[in-house]
Amino acid sequence: MKNNLIFIALIILNIPIIAQINIENSKGVISYISAQNVYTKFESTKGLEAGDTLYSIQNDKMLPAIVVTNLSSISCVGKAMEGYIPVLNATIIAKKRIFTPSIDVISQKTKNAIAINDVEIEKGTKKEDKKEDGKQKQRIDGKIALSSYSNTSSEGQGYQRFRYNVSLNADHIGNSNLSADSYVSFTHKLGDWKGFNDALRVYSLNAKYDLNKTASLSLGRKINLNMANIGAVDGLQFENNGKNFSYGALVGYRPDTYTYGFNSQLLQFGAFIGHKSESKKGYSQISLGLFNQMNNLNTDRRFAYLQHSNSLLKNVDLFCSFEIDLYSIVNNQPVTTFDLTSTYISLRYKPIKKLSLSLNYDARKNIYYYETFKNIADSIFDKETRQGFRFQTTYRPFNYVIMGLNAGFRMPTNATNYSVNGYGYITHTNLPWINASATINFTALNTGYLNGLIYGGSLSRDLYNGKLYADLSYRFVNYQFANAAAPLKQHIGELSFSWRLKKKLMLSTDFEATFDSNSNLSGRLFLNLTQRF
């Protein structure tokens, strides 16, 4: 209790957050009944603790049944609640606390970046609610997020950035065929106002009308899940998603390259067709798209996009995507080409329940940031490991213990140097006595211009009934540059908290302090308040 009070006091003093607590229902059974206790068995009791309530199923309703008094890795011992009569082998439901990073925080947090395309794809995985007569019913949800990012340094450099996000999803308004979607962001630096158009970013703003059960028309700015690789489109989109076949077309404009605003000079049009199937052996999906992008009515790029995924082999998942340029200018004349310009292949294999393996090959275009919230060490590592081959393995040798290893290699090209890198970690998810999760990790990086090592650890813990969560981490960075006399040596400490004030209101803070070998001290503070509705 004393430790909890200390952590709460640190929050009052504005020291920071990052994670979100989700509740996951897990099924178990009553394995033994004694005169005083009821014993229940689960696949795992991770996320449970003494004092939690277990539930029984009666008439399709969850009713309180057992209060947990003690537990092991797979079993719980508890007292039957008044009015509940336990029966051997009866189904019992546990509401486990699952601690996962919140996309609201990650999408703006210092060391992570989520593309708007990925957010749109994540939204597309949600199932729509239906009435009993099969018709779609209205569903409206959204969020308002206020964020602040501060950067200070002992050298006097620093700034503060504010960000305001508003998103709204209105499906089948008034139980009709009309839906709307929006995602708008407003960002500016304190004391560095460059105008309204520079601060405003409209990532999505469109209306959709369902022509029938499978076909729809959309008007406005939208990222189409079937054509997400080309990003947002300002214009008209049609798509028809049947049981096995899907097809669609679009005509509109690309957002401006520099302002992300509307640009009538960047006309584009294209179409796609896809096929998907499912069987007892697994699933298979393939889609092909053809697109023509113009600049001032002159063809700028013409390309094909091919995507395929399947799970036809047992415990094996394959995903791959390719972009093929079909147009080029040679001697000032347009010619038809067949140039493979982007490749991504991911193969995952899970031979046993406790072991997973994956192999990736990434030859997509690299991303360069004009400005980033990442520190120098993380920015370098991200840039040098984005492309090439990557092998990953995760193994759970014992209950509560997880081990992982990543290794990557990139061949040198005209645009990139070679890169060899590795990352390993070991995590204990439930340390005895303190009920915390601890991780030890290391990172190694070797390129044409540096040799680097990063090692450290972290400790995270639920502080108050799944509503308050804390994370403390430390890393030591040692980058040796080939063309620089002085290495980059840094001590990086981070303290984070997430606090669910109400069911749909969450406050997040994250503080990172960096101390280097030249006695320079810098700090970064991230604050985020999100209200869902």
Image (cartoon, grey):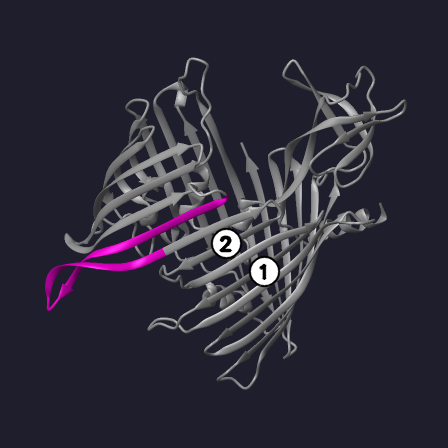
Query: Does the rendering let one see residue 224?
Result: no
The residue identified by callout 1 is 405
Q: Could you say which is closer to the camera, residue 184 or residue 138? A: 138
How many C-alpha atoms fall within 10 Å of the one at disc 2: few (<14), some, or many (≥20)?
some
Q: Nearer the viewer, residue 296 or 332?
A: 332
Residue 104 percent coordinates (x, y): 54, 45
- Which residue shows up at 41% across the image and 52% down it? 199
Q: Which residue is mark 2?
A: 358
Residue 110 relative to residue 258: left or right:
right
Assign a secondary structure to mark 2.
Answer: strand
Q: Main secondary structure of the magenta part?
A: strand
| Residue drawn at 12 percent across, 60 percent down | 335
Q: Amino acid at mark 2?
A: Ser
Q: Which residues are magenta?
A: 315-343
Q: Name the side, left or right, on which 167 lies relative to 520.
A: left
Dot 1: within a 10 Å radius of its alpha carbon, few (fewer than 14), some, or many (20 or more) residues? some
Q: Earlier in the sequence, mark 1 or mark 2?
A: 2
- Split into 4 quadrants, where in the image is the N terminus? top right
Question: Can I make out residue 429 in this image?
Answer: yes
Q: Is residue 340 magenta?
A: yes
Please identify the residue farthest to the bottom as the structure is shown: 485
* Of residues 195 and 345, the one drawn nearer to the viewer in this rendering: 345
Number of callouts in the render?
Answer: 2
Q: Position of residue 247 (x, y in %)?
A: 26, 35
